[in-house]
Image: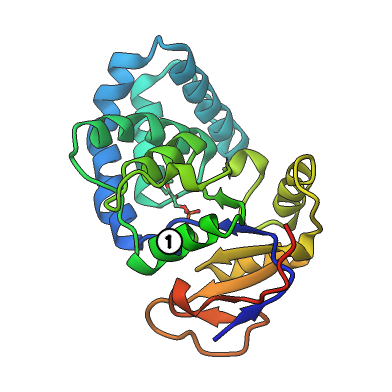
Amino acid sequence: MPSFSQIKLILTDIEGTTSSIAFVKEVLFPYAAEHLPQFIRDHQQQADVRQQLQATAELVRQQSGQSIDDDLHALTQQLLAWIRADVKATPLKALQGMIWQQGYETAAYQAHMYADATHQLRQWHAQGIPLYVYSSGSVQAQKLFYGYSQDGDLLPLFSGHFDTSVGNKREAQSYRNILAWLQQTHDIDAANILFLSDIEQELDAAADCGMQTCWLVRDEQPAGNSQHPRASDFNQIQLSSQLSH
Ligand SMILES: CSCCC(=O)C(=O)COP(=O)(O)O
Ligand SMILES: [Mg+2]
């Protein structure tokens, strides 16, 4: 069982870590794909939607030189292609968050939680350990996710949320940005943060920044050596008693 000392704060990923990959890929993504064309038609004049459509066009211009700014059909097709390919593009993630809201509010689905994750998050929160989320899903999508989870409203457990506006999850600079932000309100060093994720490259990037890491490996054990301690569920994660927060 992996054991960690000097942890004052926990930063967690969502998909594959607190919650199943299948829920995101088989429920959330198809819902967004089904509703995106109508959502864009209905809300294209809304300021926050317009802003994300412009950001989509800008990303396409950077990637391929194509200009699709005023072409609603091309913008929609691009966003649908990104959903199919699971591209973590910030404007897509922002739009998905807006679309998922109606699905949660109409109880079309509730966010999946692993029972061990809900249990441990509640325990850590009760122990006074600040919990933060870092996901490719937008902050809005994260809040909806935990607010409408199958285990009820878990949002009060979290002290804050980070998305790709701080940077890509596989880049060390993103974790430095998060650390700098957290240090404004918490007396911590990188080594006092435990980052939980199912993706080794994300853990590598967090470790580069000096954070402690735990690799959630819920199904098949990946072969090979890794610098990251592994846990098959949250109940295996031991925090030593020298906590200082
Ligand atoms: C916040 S809910 C949807 C999650 C999502 O859109 C996604 O791409 C998952 O990314 P994660 O960084 O949580 O693995
Ligand atoms: Mg993940």
Q: Is residue 68 visible?
A: no
User: Which residue is found at the position 40% from the left and 47% from the top?
Assistant: 154
Visual colour scheme? rainbow
How many C-alpha atoms fall within 10 Å of the one at disc 1: few (<14), some, or many (≥20)? Answer: many
Residue assigned mark 1: 18
Figure quadrant of residue 182 = top right
User: Which residue is found at the position 21% from the left and 44% from the top?
Assistant: 109
Amino acid beneath label 1: Thr
Residue 97's place in the image compared with 72, above or below, is below
User: Which residue is found at the position 24% from the left and 41% from the top?
Assistant: 31
Q: Is residue 64 visible?
A: yes
User: Which residue is found at the position 62% from the left and 81% from the top?
Assistant: 3
Q: Residue furthest bottom?
A: 224
Figure quadrant of residue 1 = bottom right
Residue 234's place in the image compared with 174, above or below, is below
Q: Nearer the viewer, residue 197 or 245?
A: 245
Q: Nearer the viewer, residue 104 or 79?
A: 104
Residue 60's place in the image compared with 197, above or below, is above
The percent position of residue 33, horizontal first and vertical second, equals 28, 39
The percent position of residue 88, horizontal first and vertical second, equals 50, 47
Q: Secondary structure at mark 1?
A: loop
* 33 sits to left or right of 2: left
